[in-house]
Structures are given as structure tokens and as C-alpha cells.
Amino acid sequence: MSVDERREQLIAVALELFSRRPPEEVSIDDIAAAAGASRPLVYHYFPGKQALYEASLRRAGRELSARFEEPMEGPLSERLFRVMGRYLDFVQSHGPGFAALLRGGSVAASPGTSAVIDEVRRAAHDQILAHLAVPAPSPGLRLTVRAWIANAEITSLEWLGERSVPLAELQLHLVQEFVASLTLTAAREPALAAELASFFADERPDGPSGLLVRDLAGLFAVPGILDAVTALASGRAPAAAEPVDEPSAQSTEGPAGAAPA
Amino acid sequence: MSVDERREQLIAVALELFSRRPPEEVSIDDIAAAAGASRPLVYHYFPGKQALYEASLRRAGRELSARFEEPMEGPLSERLFRVMGRYLDFVQSHGPGFAALLRGGSVAASPGTSAVIDEVRRAAHDQILAHLAVPAPSPGLRLTVRAWIANAEITSLEWLGERSVPLAELQLHLVQEFVASLTLTAAREPALAAELASFFADERPDGPSGLLVRDLAGLFAVPGILDAVTALASGRAPAAAEPVDEPSAQSTEGPAGAAPA
């Protein structure tokens, strides 16, 4: 092996080990053994475990950022759905070892590791804005994108610990939360309404947005919810529509007037 | 001063300093000077800066958790709005120094500091579930609550760095995002529909939910959005309704059939 090849091999082996166990449970001896190398050889390439840890994290960061790349084709929510599939696959294979680092409680955290994490977050942010293709993203929209990235990060880390819902559900929910956040941002910022209109115009009924809209339509068909939301939409207090001593007051609000518009 | 009083005073002074500057920019000498104590006296109480940092972080964590306490009265979104006011006030006064810790890139991060952070997150999670008063919160609902807490954390940290929107807007937006997340969770989990109905029934038109519903109603009154969402709700592709070569096709969809239900 050339010097470069050996270096890359050590990083690959280290990444494999650091992906499965927290850094305090991986020793230079473990890495040397897994690489079929001697301990002094490992030290010849890396001054210590922290340097090897940071090099493997950088490799992981590059691999993860590469998974964000997606052709600019098709409905936006479906592009994000594919990206999230690759992201969650990465979380499953590399997350266990890096979870503590991302949660902020790792002994291996350093300015070097946070630079890598920031870089990945920035890559995600930039990719999303590129796909949204909003000419001049407002501070509010940028904040929405960053907050959703944090949401995706935390939700997938929580999921790793508990696996309380199937991974495919998580993938769909995260995308739908993005659609909801984008809609909320447009509700606050009328300048985004045209962008949201063209976003929804390209969506498909069986894609993440279509499924979300249908789930919400079903939810808003539940009489109590419909009445309350309709009242709020027209500036009235929902509670006033159903006081305890005037049970018929509620019936003035029929599902016919249901459009939130 | 008694031993306990002096200890508490040193923690209070340290918290004040660590709130404004990252730990690497605060020395034991700074703390001693601000407390009107000698350097050996500080070392008599604390073995070193990290111990004092962790003690002041624990104090900050307790103060922050206390701000989550809110009477179980009134519309839920307004309770959360008040809590977020106190939370953001805390972020403003203590956030600058602890931002790096929360972002995961602090040299002072340790198992001790992450235990404090986890404790605060758990307190927030438990308070929210107590106010929601859902008898047996599903894993999906718990995940929604945790993800929203992460969202609030990241969004307020980002805000600290940029202050790109007024703080009062951020307060309202975070609460509205909670309402949206809760609604999305209920859309996925029909068992939560009754809870959501009683949530909305207690909301007021000028509260965070009322304002959100009206903003969304305004947004969905925008023709392109209304048509696209209506199409998706009924299982049709929005794009099919407005092909380039059939401009009149769109007119088959009138605002009259606008209810997503």
C-alpha cells in the first residue's frame, strides 16, 4: 500500500469502528487490529486517537453531504423523500457511534468536530435552498430550513435510541414536517405565497405532500376540529360556539362553510 | 458569609460571567475578582474552572426549568406562549455563553454538562405532556414534543447569532410551530383527533392558534395554492389542472369546492 492508500485505509477502518461504538470504547489497538497494522504504524500516520477520530468524522461528513445531492427534477417533496431515505440509512449505519457527539455530550467533541458538523448542516441548508429555488431567501425562510434540519437530526437520533416507529414512517413524517414548516413560513411571509403555489402545483397525490393534505383533510373533517378551526378562521372563539347551557349554538356552524378561506 | 453562602455567591458570579462569554474566555481570576474573593478562596470551594462551570450550568438549568412551570389554566397555546416568553428571555440573558455548549462545540462539554442539558430537555418534555393531558402519549407524540423542543433550542440559538427577526415574532412562531406539529401528529394518529378537537375548542381568535389559522386561511385563499391543495385533497395531481396547452382546465376548480375535507 502507498502512504496515501494506507492512510485512507486506516481512516476507513476507524470510521467503521467509530460508527458502531462511542470513541471512548475504541482504542488505537482496536483500529490497528482491524486494519491488520501495528500500533506504531497507526501512530506513524496519526498523532493519536483524537486525530484519527476527527479524520474519520470528516470522511463521514463528506459521505453524508454527498447523500444530499439530488437531481433538480420532479416534485420537491419526493426529492426530499429520497434524500431522507439516504440520510436515514446513513444514520442507521453510522449514527450509533456519533450520537453522543451530535447530542453534545461526547468526550471527543472539539472545535475540529464541530467544524465538521457545521459543514454538514450548511451543506443540507444550501441543498434545500437550491432545490426551493427561491431567488432571495428571507431570514425567516433560512431559519425555517435550519430549524427543520435540527428537527431531522434530533428526531433521527431519538429514533436510533428507541426505534419506536418504523424507519419508513419517520422518513415520510420528516418530509411532511418540512412541507408544513414551509407552509407556515409562507403564511407569515406573503412574499412566499407564489413560491408555495408553484411548490404545491408540482406535487403529486401519492407523494408526501398529497398524503399529508389528505390526512389533514380527514382530520379537519372531524366535526369538533372543523367547527373550532372554522370559528378561529373567522375570528370567533370556538368555545362560544358550544357553551354548556346552549347546546344548539354549535349547529349554526355547518360543514358547508368549512373552507378555512 | 457562611460556607454555603460563599459557595452560592461564587456560583452566581460564575453564572453571570459564563452567561456572557464562552468558558475559555473566563478565568478563575475573573471569577475571584468579580466575587471580591481571592484566587485561593475560589480553589478552596471548587477544584477548578470546570467544576465551577458545571455548578453554574446546573444552577442555570434549574432556573430555566423553573421557567417552564405554568398554571394549568387557559388556552394551551397561550400557556406555551407565556413559557416561551420566559424561555427566550433566559436565552437572551444566558445564551451567549452557553451557545457553544448547546451547539456541541464547547471545550467545556462533559458528561456532567450533558446530564444538565438532558435534564432541562426532559423537564420541558414532561411539562408539555402534562399540559397536553393526553392520558397515554404515543411514541409518535413524544417524538413530536422532543423534536419541537430541539427546534425551539436551535432556532433560539440561531436567533442569538443573527437576531434576524424580532424576538416577539420568534416567540409566536415557535408556539405556532408547536400547534402545527401537534396537528400533523394528530393527522397521522387518529387516536389523537379527540385531543386535538378539545385543544382547538379552548383556543381564542387572537391567541397564537387563532392567528395561525387566520394566516393559513389567507394563504389558502391564494388561487394557485387553493387549487393545488384542493386537487391533492381529492387525490388528483394539481399540475393536471393547469397544463400549458389547456389554460381553461384550471377553471373547473372553483373556490366554492375549497374545503380540504
Image (cartoon, coloured by chain):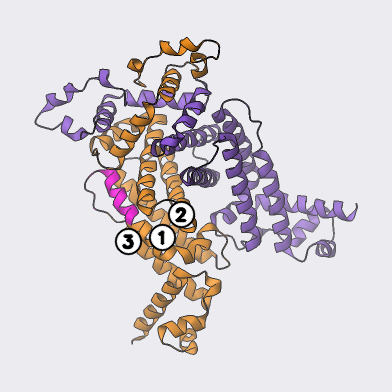
Chain colours: A purple, B orange
On the picture, is A106 further left or further right than B8?
right
- The chain that hosts pointer 3 is B
Q: Which residues are magenta?
A: B71-85
Magenta-drawn stretch contains B72 = yes
User: In the image, residue A172 lies at what x, y percent?
Assistant: 52, 32
Q: Which mark is residue A64?
A: none
**Which one is closest to the eye, mark 2 or mark 1?**
2
Asked whether the beta carbons under mark 2 and mark 1 sit within 8 Å of each other, the answer is yes
Does B181 sit above or below residue B219?
Answer: below
Magenta-drawn stretch contains A208 = no
Residue at which label 2 appears: B159
Task: Mark 2: give few (<14), some (14-19) or many (20+) Cα within 10 Å.
Answer: some
**Which one is closest to the eye, mark 1 or mark 3?**
1
Residue at which label 1 appears: B91
Q: Nearer the viewer, residue B138 or B241?
A: B241
In the rendered image, residues at marks 1 and 3 fall on the same chain:
yes
Please tell me which residue is depicted at 51% across the width and 14% down the height of the picture: B240
Residue B8 makes an appearance in the image: yes
Local secondary structure at mark 2: helix
Q: What amino acid type should be assigned to the residue bearing mark 2?
A: Trp
Q: What amino acid type should be assigned to the residue bearing mark 1?
A: Val
Could you give the CA–CA distance between mark 2 and mark 1, rounded to whole angstroms?
10 Å
Task: Mark 1: give few (<14), some (14-19) or many (20+) Cα within 10 Å.
Answer: many
Q: Nearer the viewer, residue B3 or B29?
A: B29
Q: Main secondary structure of the magenta part?
A: helix
Earlier sequence position, callout 1 versus callout 3: 3
In the rendered image, residues at marks 2 and 1 fall on the same chain:
yes
Does A75 sit above or below residue B107?
Answer: above
Q: What amino acid type should be assigned to the residue bearing mark 3?
A: Ala
